[in-house]
Image (spheres, grey):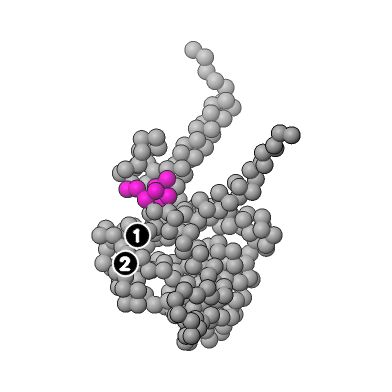
Amino acid sequence: MHLQDPARRALDSTIGALTSRHWMIDAVRYLVDNGIKWRAMPCDFPPWPRVYAFFARWRDAGLVAELHDRLREAVRRSEGRDGEPSAAIVDSQSVKADATVAHTTRGFDAGKKVNGRKRHLLTDTLGLLLGVLVTPASTTDRDAARSLLPAAKSRFRRLARIWADGGYTGHLTDWTLQHLGIVLDIVRRSDDVQGFQVLPRRWVVERSFAWLLRSRRLVRDYERRTDTSQSVVLWSMTMLMSRRLAARHRPVPVRAA
């Protein structure tokens, strides 16, 4: 009986682990992109319990956040920017919640007439995600910002200015400057203009919300836990950024003379 040498067995084990991880990542991305149920995972991927266990491990260990942050830094540097941003935009989006979402983690947004959850995003000036917080839809933007902005400042020391809409007015502007050293610049909508209006800086985060809704899993909130919902947002952005980086490194075909 022929036995492989230890180096060969170790190499085969490493290749197998990398291949398995690649399949797991593809399976999670497929679920987020197409909005399927976990139990509806196609047979081309590993069994759904294994894929969900992989998703949960990466969520709890912060690995999906680390993957996302490395991709964001790579995209920023490919655009000629510093890896760490100095300015950002904050906004929120209310989405309906599925029946699987518990009443303790959902609420009613009276302004948008939405019963579900609210996604609070902090993006850089390219629209790339710096922070995400999922709360019941009844949570005000100001209350969410008191959790979202300090967490962002602890990670991005250069952050000095944030643009926001009228939902962030009041004592929050003074609190942000006093406790975080960040200027919160309110971009207001003109009362004289009716209908759709492109607002300076704020359109960037609105575009980021549109990017997220390309992932069908995010059209409605299906997740039982808010941290799971936040992880799905991160997975969606990793797909967008990896495609952008791949397009930059794709060789240009040479036309025949």
Q: Give the left or right position of residue 152, taking residue 250 as reference.
A: left
**Would you say the magenta stretch is mainly helix, strand or loop?**
helix
Q: Residue at x 60, y 50 (%)?
A: 245
Q: Residue at x 37, y 62 (%)?
A: 226
Which amino acid, mark 1?
Arg
Examine the rendering and report whether any part of residue 61 can be seen: no
Identify the magenta region: 30-37
Of the pair 116 and 23, the residue shown nearer to us: 116
Of marks 2 and 1, which one's residue comes earlier in the chain?
Answer: 2
Q: Which residue is mark 1?
A: 220
Q: Which residue is mark 2?
A: 116
Of the pair 200 and 141, the residue shown nearer to us: 200
Q: Give the left or right position of residue 98, taking residue 59 as reference.
A: left
Magenta stretch holds residue 216: no
Position of residue 222 measured from the top left corner of the image (x, y, whole percent): 32, 57
Position of residue 244 measured from the top left corner of the image (x, y, whole percent): 58, 51
